Amino acid sequence: MKKIGNHNEEPTLRQKAEDSLKKKSYEAGPQLSKADALKLIHELQVYQEELKMQNEELALAKKQAAENAASKYAELYDFAPSGYLTLNRRGEIIMLNLSAANMLCKERSYLLNNNFGFYISKDTLPGFQLFLNKAFKSRKKETCEIILSLKDNAPVHVHLSAILSEDSDQCLMSAVDITEQKQAEEVLSRSEKRLQQEVKDRTQELEELNLSILAELIKRKLSQKQLKKSLHDYKLLYAYLQKVREEERLNLARIIHDDLAQLLSTMKIELISWKERPEKQDTASHDPIGSLLHLVEECMSAVTSIIVELRPVLPEKIGLIPALQKLFAEFQKRTEITCDIRIQDDAFAIDSESAYAIYRVVQEALTNIRNHAKASYVTVKISGTPASFSLTIKDNGIGANQDKINDHRSFGIIGMRERIIGMRGSITIKGVHGKGTTVHLKVPVTM
């Protein structure tokens, strides 16, 4: 029997057929005539021709099916939504579909044999090269993200997946455009950052509000505490003022009794004596009129002392600087404490009420030096400008205790502060142990 066709299956079938005939016992059939033999040969030849034609039809159908499958595969490859590329080890494009060519904005024929790295941005090119090296060294699937930098076109974000071919000479790579996804992620990221910033800002506002509320509560508590303390201090001050008032009344009563009342009593005695026995008065040895005038002058002097004690008239009459100079001179005379007065500048004009308040403050400071400082020397610096008046008193005494200075029962110091604060000025009192005490005041001057 002749060999039918060129298919790989036929030798195998023939072998199977021969093996099958060998297993069967051959039995000689009846002898055929020549005509029967020729007829049988003709039938076999016809059957052989039929098999040959069937084999050719089968081969043609198989070829057509293969061509149809290849056409469908090519269509699917070219028009797939993802880009497909085949690269060699140098990164050159061996093959690519239409989607990949459209992604690179070039004709497919132009891109063949070009290096894929030419179209990748400089920032993501090192990552792509590392990705390609890994793909050729490993049988595992490798992935990376790149940015295509195309002339006159916006950057394109691409996700790459690659795997090594069976012959290990090529890299099969798919490319998916993820630009919209990246843009959405960027928008989402910006929204998230904005939301986080808003939350942060709102949290900060709430914290600041809480702190302000807490500060206000603390301030109110301190205010209440200070108010209670002030009320307590004012009660003590009121009691002190009442005591001082009583002492002043007693002092005035003493001055009036010891000086003025005695002078008036003497005048009364002189007048009574003159009235009852005028004829017995020896005008040659005793001048009653002159004596009475002298007593009247002493009464007037006593009254003036009382008035000065109640309210000094020196600042109003002669001015603040001369009044202070006179006050320091009298203080030095009474206490034997040396006073060094230095007037640096007196270019100021101060009203009588402010001058009186400053005079009283200096009086109180000198009283404290006399009663408590144990000083032997006092320096006084006076300066002024058209806008302010400044005065500094410093002694060389034992130095006032700071706790005593700040004590709410130090009514003399409280009075000094209240007078200066009432003029919108400032006063500081500082004591140094063994080195003395310094009082500095500064008062604005009304232009």
Image (spheres, helix red, strand yellow):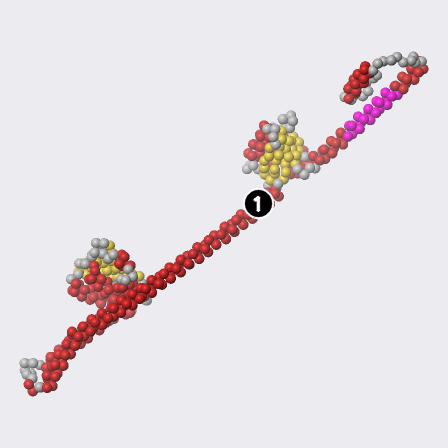
Give the quadrant of the N terminus: top right
Q: Secondary structure at mark 1?
A: helix
> Closest to the observer: 138 or 136?
138
> Closest to the observer: 50 or 246?
246
Q: Is residue 424 left or right of residue 286?
A: right
Write the residue at 65% across / 27% down: 166
Q: Residue 309: x and y, percent?
A: 21, 71
Q: Is residue 383 visible?
A: no
Write the residue at 53% across / 47% down: 193
Q: Residue 441: x and y, percent?
A: 28, 61
Asked whether 147 falls inside the magenta stretch, the response is no
Write the residue at 35% across / 61% down: 226
Q: Which residues are magenta?
A: 45-65
Asked whether 60 falls inside the magenta stretch, the response is yes
> Closest to the observer: 153 or 417?
417
Asked if residue 271 is positioned above or below residue 213 in the image, the reply reads below
Q: Is residue 76 left or right of residue 395?
A: right
Binning the other alpha carbons within 10 Å of mark 1 as few (below 14), some (14 to 19) or many (20 upward) gives few
Image quadrant assignment for residue 427: bottom left
Q: Is residue 73 visible?
A: yes
Q: Residue 207: x and y, percent?
A: 46, 53
Asked if residue 101 is positioned above or below residue 342 in the image, the reply reads above
Query: Looking at the magenta stretch, what is its main secondary structure?
Result: helix
Image quadrant assignment for residue 363: bottom left
Q: What type is the residue that disc 1 sits on? A: Glu
Q: Residue furthest bottom?
A: 279
Write the residue at 66% across / 34% down: 84
Asked if residue 395 is positioned above or below residue 353 in the image, the reply reads above
Look at mark 1 in the image and give the residue it sits on.
Answer: 186
